[in-house]
Amino acid sequence: MKKVIIYSTRICPYCMRAKNFLDKKEIPYEDIMVDENPDQLQIMMEKSKRQSVPQIFIGDYHIGGFDDLVEHDMDGKLDDLLKG
């Protein structure tokens, strides 16, 4: 399974939803808290070209935010991306 990274903050409700979604699907992920590490915030913005959280990556592929994650799942693309 490809590595999943989620850039998030402690107070973001969509970050919580994304993590709960991944937990329910038993998809392991690395949670990078950008509110605790400004260097990681800069990395996230460079990689995603976005300033909002969450930003979710599967391998090198940028999923986007929570809504994008759910859309990928509903379209049947999420499992394929995880397998790579």
Image (cartoon, rainbow, N blue to C red):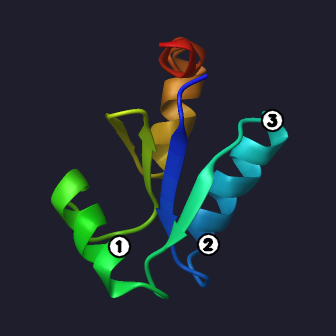
Q: Is residue 81 above or below residue 35?
A: above
Q: Is residue 44 above or below residue 74?
A: below
Kind of residue at badge 3: Glu
Q: Residue at x 49, y 88 (%)?
A: 36
Instruction: Tell me which label, 3 or 2, sits earlier in the chain.
Output: 2
Q: What is the distance, in whole Å, between disc 3 and disc 2 at their CAs?
A: 20 Å
Q: What is the distance, in whole Å, between disc 1 and disc 3 at their CAs?
A: 25 Å
* Residue 26 appears left or right of 58: right
Identify residue for label 2.
Answer: 13
Identify residue for label 3.
Answer: 26
Instruction: Tell me which label, 1 or 3, sits earlier in the chain.
Output: 3
Kind of residue at badge 1: Gln
Give residue 18's position: percent from left, percent from top.
62, 53
> Nearest the camera: 9 or 14?
9
Mark 3 residue element: loop
* Residue 37 appears left or right of 83: left
* Residue 77 appears left or right of 18: left
Image quadrant containing the N terminus: top right
